[in-house]
Image (cartoon, grey):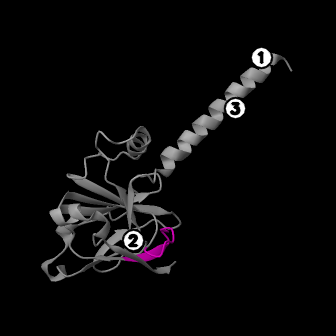
């Protein structure tokens, strides 16, 4: 093999390894500055000038409107409260209490970060849906089969993620975000 072939092969291999590494890091997300709270995780540096370039790339890939944490905090869950990956064939109870934010919502996404088509056209549950009778605690069933009460449809056989958005989080939350009381996700059964 000629010398220039070796150089060309080395360049191609280097580009492939570099691009593959960048793709992996951006899709996996970063753990620098991340907070975990039960199944939920976040970073409070989204939307700030202090955000590093890899985090910016990851945020851009996911399509998050990256506002600073004084405006919005984005929590993500890809596992239940026991650490098991979320599965659309299973039924989960998501329970919680009112969150310390002006407005909040939990939205169902596929693993690529897209809404999943469903016949009920339901993708999200928000604090607006909580009735006065549920002020001390609410429950949402996440699963493939419709139930009475609050329900988020899931897609059988597909893993999924949940995004919890807290808009204008309160002073108590901002003082200790790691200690916030966030929704619990418990698997009830699988189809």
The crowding category of the residue bearing disc 1, from other C-alpha atoms within 10 Å (few below 14, some 14 to 19, many at least 20), is: few
Q: Nearer the viewer, residue 83 or 109?
A: 83
Q: Residue 38 carries which label?
A: 2
- The N terminus, quarter of image: top right
Sequence order check: which comes first, mark 2 or mark 1? 1
CA–CA distance in space, label 3 to label 2: 40 Å
User: Residue at position x 41%, y 44% from top?
Assistant: 55
Mark carried by residue 69: none
| Residue bearing mark 1 | 4
Tags 3 and 2 touching, CB below 8 Å: no
Secondary element at tag 2: loop
Q: How crowded is mark 2: few (under 14 residues within 10 Å), some or many (20 or more)?
A: some
Residue 189 located within the stretch drawn in magenta:
no
**Residue depicted at 32% across the width and 66% down the height:** 178
Rounded to the nearest angstrom, the CA distance separating label 1 from label 3 is: 14 Å
Relative side of 79 to 184, left or right:
right
Q: What element carries label 1?
A: helix
Q: In this view, does 3 lie to the left or right of 152?
A: right
Q: Earlier in the sequence, mark 3 or mark 2?
A: 3
Residue 27 image position (x, y, % from top left): 50, 48
Q: Quadrant for residue 181, please give it.
A: bottom left
Q: What stretch is highlighted in magenta?
A: 81-93
Residue 2 seen from this side = yes
> Where's residue 35, x and y in %?
37, 60
Question: What residue does disc 3 label?
Answer: 13
**Which residue is located at x 39 percent, y 71 percent?**
38
Q: Distance between the residues labelled 2 and 1?
A: 54 Å
The tag earlier along the polypeptide, 1 or 3, is 1
Question: Residue 67's spot in the image, x, y percent?
Answer: 25, 46
* Whole-percent x, y for residue 82 in the image: 47, 76
Judge the density around disc 3: few (<14), some (14-19), many (≥20) Cα neighbours within 10 Å: few
Q: Which residue is drawn at 26% across and 62% down?
A: 105
């Amino acid at each position: 093999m000629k010398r220039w072939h070796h150089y060309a092969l080395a360049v191609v291999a280097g580009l492939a390894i570099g691009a593959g590494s960048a793709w992996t890091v951006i899709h996996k997300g970063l753990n620098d500055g991340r907070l975990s709270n039960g199944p939920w995780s976040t970073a409070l540096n989204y939307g700030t000038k202090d955000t590093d370039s890899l985090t910016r790339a990851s945020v851009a890939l996911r399509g998050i409107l990256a506002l600073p944490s004084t405006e919005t905090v984005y929590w993500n869950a890809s596992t239940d409260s026991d650490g098991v990956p979320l599965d659309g064939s299973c039924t989960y109870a998501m329970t919680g209490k009112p969150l310390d934010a002006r407005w909040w919502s939990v939205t169902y996404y596929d693993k690529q970060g897209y809404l999943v088509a469903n016949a009920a056209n339901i993708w999200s549950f928000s604090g607006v849906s909580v009735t006065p009778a549920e002020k001390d605690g609410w429950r949402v069933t996440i699963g493939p089969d419709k139930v009475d009460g609050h329900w988020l449809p899931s897609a059988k056989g597909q893993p999924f993620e949940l995004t919890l958005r807290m808009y204008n989080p309160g002073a108590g939350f901002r003082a200790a975000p790691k200690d916030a009381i966030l929704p619990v996700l418990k698997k009830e059964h699988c189809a």
